[in-house]
Image (tube, coloured by chain):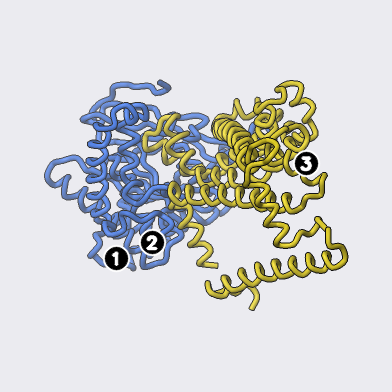
Chain colours: A yellow, B blue
């Protein structure tokens, strides 16, 4: 029936079935490709993939470093710093723009313009202004996520029912308490949702910047190995990126459950009603 | 401070409107809403305000809360031992408590936290809570005990740890009333608080208000000051008559054409006492019906030309 919710075991079964179908499809395609060309590297076999993974995790003969460790260290540092500055900047700006119209009218137009700028198109600018170190990658991520996150948080702040604001005033709330004890707490779950949504774009900006300029990092390694058509290395790297994104997202979901139980229950209640 | 303080004589008036006028827009786009409202509410009164849709009840309420001060005239709240201090209200503060129909609670706080929230905002400062955590924890415990007492009073102690989304509409309004009561404001405004509830729940909540009114009467018998003064805005005439000891009718239907070329705004056209009920006293439906008819004629029916 249309829209009828599945039982948990049915959802599990369908999920695993889809995983098995994808893996079986890949195996079939890879085998077929290798029947045509035994040296094919575009759709590596499982044993080729195993060799690729070994290349990633074992010490490299030439550099003496493990690719995965040095790339993960460099990319993670850039990503975390970029998300930290970009997101906390957005939180601060969005919250205060939503609360104080004067700040809003001063900042909303430059942020609207900035939000239309694809940071990957302005790499040369970042290169000139911030150099080639970590700052450049952080700058790309900040410029990529800050304007949209700010505007989203500003909208969430403005969406708070006036009744709640009035009520807080009649209970004796000062301006600071209004901002931090009422408005911030009200928008916190949406702030976390916004951060979850920005992980993907942040990764895109980082990989693109590393693709173009880096000497180490996921983007650099992907560019290098893709040029050599070493898909046995590229595919595991892509899986690592996906897992990285999932882990980060999962941690944020846990954070939301811990800090905003009311929101999680409200949402599950709404879904239950549906 | 944007409040003026003056000494007045000893009086029982707790709340007063003086020539309150309100309009939106200017020039040709001017839309007059309220015209020269004069009203005195005495300490301990439960006043019901009724009026047709669009008569300006919400605008009046906003003016009373202080979020939209009147264009002219004053809202005065009296305080002090003998209500001798008159304060012209220009912004929302804890003198006036409010219970709305929707969004009556903070969704991120449990029932007990919602009730204690006002005490936290009123009695402590953010910096103080951060710098003196031990003192704040001690005070917090007292606040929670008071909040629990208040929840007991409105019959909700078993639901104290639930979030608003886990409470029924009636329970939410009980918590909202407790949240307003704990602050001991000079007057509590109820903005159609039971409008979205079923009849049984609505009756229960009316009984809760009647119990508070009985507490007022008991205190006055002992020679004490009554604790609760309420202004209830409602669409339901039955509710207005059952809960209120006085009914006000705000209406655009009054004889304004004699003195004005264009509509100057709604006025209070009905101000009469209502019979006093207690939760266990059955309503006198015949008497209620007679008064309802009078109110309908005075407030809701357009005047004959």
Q: Please state which of residues A80 and B28 is positioned toward the viewer in this rendering.
A: A80
Picture coordinates of residue B100 (x, y %)? 43, 49
Picture coordinates of residue A241 (x, y %)? 65, 48
The residue at which mark 3 appears reads as A224
Q: Residue at x 62, y 47 (%)?
A: A57
Quick one: label 2, few (<14), some, or many (20+) residues within 10 Å? Answer: some
Task: Indicate the secondary structure of the residue bearing disc 1.
Answer: loop
Dots 3 and 2 on the same chain: no
Q: Chain letter of disc 3?
A: A
Quick one: label 1, few (<14), some, or many (20+) residues within 10 Å? Answer: some
Picture coordinates of residue B208 (x, y %)? 28, 57
The residue at which mark 2 appears reads as B238
Image quarter where the N terminus of chain B lies is top left
Q: Residue furthest bottom?
A: A1
Q: Would you identify the image quadrant in which residue B163 lies?
A: bottom left
Dots 3 and 1 on the same chain: no
Q: Residue at x 73, y 38 (%)?
A: A220
| Real-space CA distance between mark 3 and mark 1, rounded to the nearest whole angstrom | 86 Å
Task: Indicate the secondary structure of the residue bearing disc 3.
Answer: helix
The residue at which mark 1 appears reads as B283
């Amino acid at each position: 029936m249309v829209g009828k919710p599945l039982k948990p075991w049915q959802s599990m079964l369908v999920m695993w079935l889809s995983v098995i179908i994808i893996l079986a499809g890949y195996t079939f395609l890879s085998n077929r490709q290798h029947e045509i060309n035994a040296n094919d590297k575009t759709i590596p076999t499982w044993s080729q993939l195993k060799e690729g993974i070994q290349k990633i995790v074992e010490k490299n003969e030439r550099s003496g470093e493990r690719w995965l460790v040095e790339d993960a260290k460099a990319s993670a540092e850039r990503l975390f710093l970029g998300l930290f500055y970009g997101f906390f900047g957005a939180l601060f700006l969005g919250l205060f723009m939503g609360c104080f119209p004067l700040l809003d009218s001063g900042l909303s137009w430059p942020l609207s313009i900035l939000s239309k700028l694809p940071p990957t198109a302005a790499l040369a600018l970042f290169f000139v202004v911030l150099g080639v170190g970590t700052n450049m990658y952080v700058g790309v991520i900040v410029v990529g996520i800050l304007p949209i996150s700010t505007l989203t948080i500003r909208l969430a702040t403005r969406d708070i029912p006036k009744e709640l604001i009035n009520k807080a005033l009649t209970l004796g709330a000062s301006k600071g308490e209004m901002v931090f004890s009422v408005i911030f707490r009200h928008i916190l779950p949406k702030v976390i949702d916004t951060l979850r949504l920005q992980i993907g774009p942040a990764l895109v900006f980082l990989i693109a910047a590393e693709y173009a300029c880096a000497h180490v990092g996921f983007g650099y390694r992907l560019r290098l190995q893709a040029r050599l058509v070493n898909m046995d290395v590229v595919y595991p790297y892509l899986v690592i990126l996906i897992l990285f994104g999932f882990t980060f997202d999962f941690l944020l979901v846990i954070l939301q459950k811990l800090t905003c139980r009311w929101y999680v229950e409200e949402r599950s209640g709404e879904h239950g009603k549906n | 401070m944007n409040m003026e303080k003056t000494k007045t004589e000893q009086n029982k008036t707790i709340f007063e409107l003086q020539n309150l006028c309100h309009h939106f827009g200017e020039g040709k786009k001017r839309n007059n809403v309220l015209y020269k409202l004069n009203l005195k509410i005495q300490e301990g009164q439960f006043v019901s305000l009724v009026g047709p849709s669009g008569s300006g009840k919400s605008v009046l309420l906003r003016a009373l809360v202080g979020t939209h001060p009147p264009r002219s005239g004053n809202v005065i709240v009296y305080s002090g031992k003998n209500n001798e201090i008159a304060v012209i209200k220009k912004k929302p503060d804890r003198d006036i408590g409010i219970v709305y129909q929707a969004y009556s609670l903070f969704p991120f706080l449990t029932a007990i936290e919602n009730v204690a929230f006002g005490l936290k905002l009123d009695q402590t400062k953010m910096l103080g809570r951060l710098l003196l955590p031990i003192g704040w924890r001690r005070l917090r415990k007292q606040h929670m005990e008071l909040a629990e007492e208040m929840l007991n009073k409105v019959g909700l102690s078993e639901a104290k740890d639930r979030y608003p989304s886990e409470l029924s509409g009636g329970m939410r309004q009980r918590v909202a009333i407790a949240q307003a009561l704990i602050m001991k404001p000079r007057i509590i405004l109820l903005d159609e608080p039971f409008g979205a509830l079923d009849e049984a729940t609505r009756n229960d909540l009316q009984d809760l208000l009647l119990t508070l009114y009985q507490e007022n009467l008991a205190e006055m018998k002992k020679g004490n000051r009554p604790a609760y003064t309420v202004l209830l805005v409602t669409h339901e005439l039955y509710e207005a008559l059952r809960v209120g000891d006085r009914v006000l009718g705000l209406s655009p239907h009054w004889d304004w054409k004699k003195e004005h070329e264009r509509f100057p705004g709604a006025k209070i056209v009905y101000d009469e006492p209502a019979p006093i009920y207690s939760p266990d006293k059955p309503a006198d439906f015949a008497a209620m019906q007679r008064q309802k008819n009078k109110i309908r004629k005075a407030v809701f029916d357009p005047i004959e030309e």
